[in-house]
Amino acid sequence: LGSQNLDGIATSGYNNTMTMAMTHATGSCRNGSFSMNSTQYFALIKEPQMHFAAGPAAHAPSARVPIDPRSLVSQGGCIPRFTVQSSGPTPPAGRFIMYSRISMQPQNASANASGFAFVTERGNVKMLSVSAAAMLFEIPPGFTREQ
């Protein structure tokens, strides 16, 4: 997609398409497929990282990604087979996303089925030094706690 200047920040755009088909479904699962299209603009800025004063292991959030991706759609003994096809360049890892639109559309579905999209747009992004960023979370001078 080329370069764009979003809210004063230089970005590079990527467009990717993926089609996923579930076949050989059993039990409560049904065969089906969907397509996903993503349009994203990545800044040259690195993705922010979380840091904890007590160390990363003390307060780090637990992982939310299941060990087996099939568990997202299969339950009750259903073990489907997935086939995935994708096209488009691989977006850069670890870069800050200024704009993202991910749309999903069921394939071979009834006329009632409709897709959906997620859009994330960031603005007013400011680069701060470590000391300037720390001031955002410190108790201001002269603060008095009320009882």
Image (cartoon, rainbow, N blue to C red):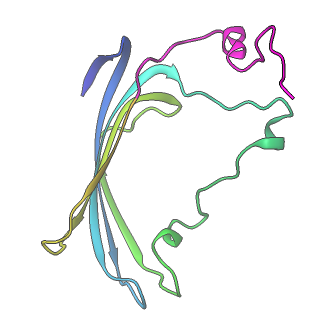
Identify whether 27 is placed above or below 66.
Answer: below
Residue at far front of view = 147
Say if 114 sits above or below 130 in the image.
below
Name the outermost residue toward the left.
111
Residue at x 34% of width, y 62% of height: 84
- Check residue 126 for magenta coloring: yes
Q: Residue at x 68, y 32 (%)?
A: 50
Query: Does residue 65 appear to the left or right of 125 in the view shown?
Result: right
Residue 144 against residue 88 in the figure, above or below: above
Residue 2: horizontal and vertical position, in percent?
Answer: 26, 23
Image location of residue 48, percent across then percent down: 59, 27
- Residue 5 location (% of width, % of height): 31, 15
* Viewer-side residue, 141 vs 80: 141
Quarter of the image containing the N terminus?
top left
* The quadrant where residue 26 appears: bottom left
Q: Which part of the image, by quadrant, shows the C terminus?
A: top right
Does 70 appear in magenta?
Answer: no
Image: 144 above or below 22: above
Q: Is residue 109 left or right of residue 90?
A: left
Q: Position of residue 68 (x, y in %)?
A: 57, 67
Q: Residue at x 65, y 9 (%)?
A: 129
Residue at 39% over, 83% down: 29
Magenta stretch, residue numbers: 122-147
Q: Nearer the viewer, residue 144 or 120?
A: 144
